[in-house]
Structures are given as C-alpha cells and as structure tokens.
Image (cartoon, rainbow, N blue to C red):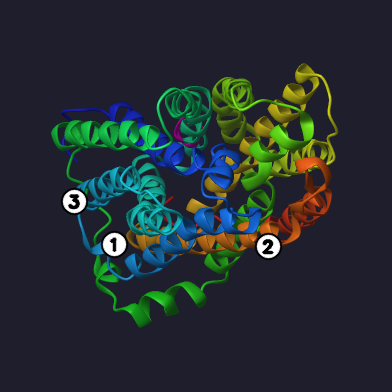
C-alpha cells in the first residue's frame, strides 16, 4: 500500500462511504409514515420497501463472497460504491410503489457489498489490538448519519419532495467516489492461494471452521434483534408518542449526537478491557431502553428523547465490540469472502425481521400502531441468545 495517504485518511474516507450508505438505508424509515400516506399502503406493504433493499443486499453479499478476495480492495470498493451511488439516484426517479421497490433492489445489489468491504479494509489496516478504536470511528458514521444525514434528508423531503434526499445522497456519493479514485491506495496484501478458491471451497472453508460459523450466527442474531424494532421507530413516535413529522429529526439528532461522542470512547474501552466484556455490558444495557420505548405512551418530548438517545447509545455500544470480535474470527486472506457472507446473512436477517415486525404491527385505534410491545420483547429475547455464542469466538491467526 502506497504511503501517499496514511491509514487515518483511508479510515475517514471509509467512514464517509459508510455515512452515505447508512443514510440511504436509514432515511427510508423516517419517511415511512409519509410514504404510507402518499402511496396509500399498509405497514406491511411499507416493510416490503425496507426488506426489498435488504434481501437484494443479502443476495449480492452472498454471491460476492465467491470472488471478492481475488481483487485489489481499491478496485472492489470503487466499483461497488459507484454502483451504489447510481442506484441511489435511481430511487429519485421512482414515481410509484413498485418503481420504488425496483430502485431499492438495484441499490441493494451494490449496497450489500459496501459494508463487508469497509470492515475488511479496516481489518486489513489495523491489528486486533487497535481495531476497536478504528471500528469506533467507522461505526460513528451511523451517528453522523443520524445527526446530519437524516435531518438534512427529512428537511429536503419536507421542503421539496421525498425524492430530494436521494438526489442529494447520490450526488454526494459520486463526489466521494471521485475523491476515492485520487487517494485510495492499491491493497493486494490479502490476495493468496485461498483467495482463488472456487465457490464450493469458499463455503467449505467457512462451514468447516466453528469459529467462523459462531461469528456468522452472532452477527445475524444481533441484526435480527435490531431490525424487529428499527423500521417502526419513526412511525411509532409520530402515531403513538405524539411527535410531528418535523420534530422526528430531533430523535436522530440527539441519538446520533450522543453516539458521535460515545462511539470512539466505547472503541477505546473495547481495546482496553476486551471486546467480550464491553459487548456483554452493552447488550444487557440495551434491553432496558428497547423495552421502555416499545411500550412508550404519549409523553413529553424530552422524556421520549432521553429514552431513544439511551437506546441509540446502547445499541451502537454493542455493535462496536461485536464487529471487533467477528472480524477477528477469520484470517486476512479470506476475510473479504467471510465478511461478504456475514453481510449477506445480516441483510437477510434484517429483511426477515422487518417482514416479521410488519406482520405483527397493525393499525390500531385512532391511527395508532398496535402490537409494538410484542416486537420489543422478541427483539430483546433474540439478542440475548448471542450471549451463548460470543464467549466461543477466538482470534484467528494474522489478526
């Protein structure tokens, strides 16, 4: 890797890519109530829009596992990110429910590979002992998406139309892609004999290693628990808690702002006392705000924001050590393939969880959403299962 730009520059470039990728996915959910009214669709039909992206991303992530490690990381990330940016622009051209679903499928085909590539590159750049801090910075893109991206997207949607956030994101993505062409170095150190394995060998290599299987299961469980709750956060705040469409941006600003501050601290804590300890602490803590939020009645705005901010912090707090543990479960030369399979399973888990939540949450009296508390209980129960898996994970050679 050429030393024209240091690791820190590359890390922040990856965080910027992650930022646009996450905003693209996140912005659809706070637009949920608006889209349900615009297209005259039910909560179940809305979750199809969300799951269309995740199913597509899951499929592309799975098939990319068979070849992703054969390429220079630079080539792979530039290709997938450009495709993602163009896919996001295609969403802006959708004028019907089915056109929107088709555009989200296209965006997901490329978006499904970005997360895996970002984590693979970070893991190639940083050793396990310093990876927690790096993961904290990359996952802070989620916070930045909440603080800056989602509020800007909602502002554009309210002042113009719902297409405008995707025009902005797609254009920003193309600009970041041009910067990446200039500063992103060639990265071929991971390419070895295992990188040339055929699809059957790739799958055999993963399933024959208990460590990698545990990492896949753990990642899928966590995402499954999250996406039972996430798709209906904004609609529930509007219909049940009493927020307006304009004030919903505050949820993301406060929650994301807190994560911007706590994310790097949790990353350093992960490096200092161990990923497993930090993961366990925040997993248990996250159950409290999830259960409170999914049962939240109409309350003053400040109380709702305290609950959701604590929920954002604790959910992100368990993701940082989880990513640190799972990226260390595989050797560098096959990390891209493994992370693609992991990303695929997580996307499929997210899509499944969204559809399950959509089948449980229904229209209640006075335009409210009913049965959300059941979703909260299921989410907590699912994530607690990961405590049976996490202690079994070991650090593979080369990390």
User: Regarding mark 3 in the picture, which secondary structure is present there?
Assistant: helix
Residue at (34% x, 41% y) in the render:
125
Q: Quadrant of residue 138?
A: top left
Is residue 239 part of the magenta span, yes or no? no
Residue at numbered disc 3: 75
In front: 161, or 225? 161
Relative to 140, is 395 above or below?
below
Please tell me how many numbered marks the rendered image carries.
3
Q: Who comes first in sequence, dot 3 or dot 2?
A: 3
The boundaries of the magenta stretch are 134-138
Where in the figure is residue 205, as x and y percent of width and height?
43, 75
Gap in angstroms between the C-alphas marked 1 and 3: 10 Å
User: Regarding mark 1 in the picture, which secondary structure is present there?
Assistant: helix
Residue at the limit of the structure toward the bottom, as seen here: 200
Residue at numbered disc 1: 68
Q: Who comes first in sequence, dot 1 or dot 2?
A: 1
Q: Closer to the observer: label 3 or label 2?
A: 2
Image check: 323 left or right of 198? right
| Chief secondary structure of the magenta portion | helix
Where in the figure is residue 140, as x and y percent of width and height?
50, 30
């Amino acid at each position: 890797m050429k030393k024209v730009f240091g690791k820190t520059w590359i890390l922040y470039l990856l965080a910027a890519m992650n930022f646009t990728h996450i905003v693209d996915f996140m912005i659809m959910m706070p637009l949920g109530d608006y889209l349900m009214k615009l297209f005259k669709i039910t909560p179940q039909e809305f979750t199809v829009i969300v799951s269309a992206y995740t199913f597509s991303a899951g499929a592309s992530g799975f098939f990319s596992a068979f070849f992703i490690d054969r390429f220079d990381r630079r080539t792979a990330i530039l290709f997938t990110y450009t495709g993602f940016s163009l896919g996001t622009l295609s969403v802006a051209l959708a004028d019907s429910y089915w056109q929107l679903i088709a555009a989200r499928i296209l965006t997901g085909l490329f978006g499904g590979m970005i997360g895996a590539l970002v984590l693979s590159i970070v893991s190639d750049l940083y050793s396990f002992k310093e990876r927690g801090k790096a993961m904290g910075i990359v996952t802070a893109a989620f916070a930045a998406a909440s603080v800056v991206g989602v509020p800007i997207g909602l502002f554009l949607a309210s002042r113009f139309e719902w297409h405008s956030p995707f025009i902005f994101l797609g254009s920003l993505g193309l600009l970041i892609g041009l910067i990446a062409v200039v500063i992103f170095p060639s990265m071929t150190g991971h390419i070895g004999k295992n990188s040339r394995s055929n699809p059957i060998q790739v799958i055999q290599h993963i399933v024959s290693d208990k460590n990698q299987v545990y990492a896949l299961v753990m990642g899928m469980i966590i995402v499954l628990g999250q996406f039972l709750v996430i798709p209906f956060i904004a609609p529930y705040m509007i219909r049940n808690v009493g927020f307006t469409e304009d004030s919903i941006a505050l949820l993301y600003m406060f929650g994301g702002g807190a994560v911007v501050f706590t994310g790097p601290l949790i990353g350093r804590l992960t490096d200092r006392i161990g990923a497993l300890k930090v993961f366990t602490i925040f997993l248990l803590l996250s159950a409290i705000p999830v259960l409170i939020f999914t049962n939240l009645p109409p309350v003053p705005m400040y109380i709702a924001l305290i609950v959701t901010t604590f929920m954002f912090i604790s959910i992100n707090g368990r993701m940082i050590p989880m990513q640190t543990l799972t990226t260390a479960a595989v050797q560098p030369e096959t990390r891209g393939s493994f992370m693609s399979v992991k990303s695929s399973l997580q996307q499929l888990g997210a899509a499944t969880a969204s559809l399950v939540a959509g089948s449980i949450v229904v229209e209640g009296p006075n335009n409210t959403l009913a049965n959300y508390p059941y979703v909260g209980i299921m989410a907590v129960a699912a994530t607690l299962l990961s405590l049976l898996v996490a202690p079994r994970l070991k650090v593979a050679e080369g990390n």
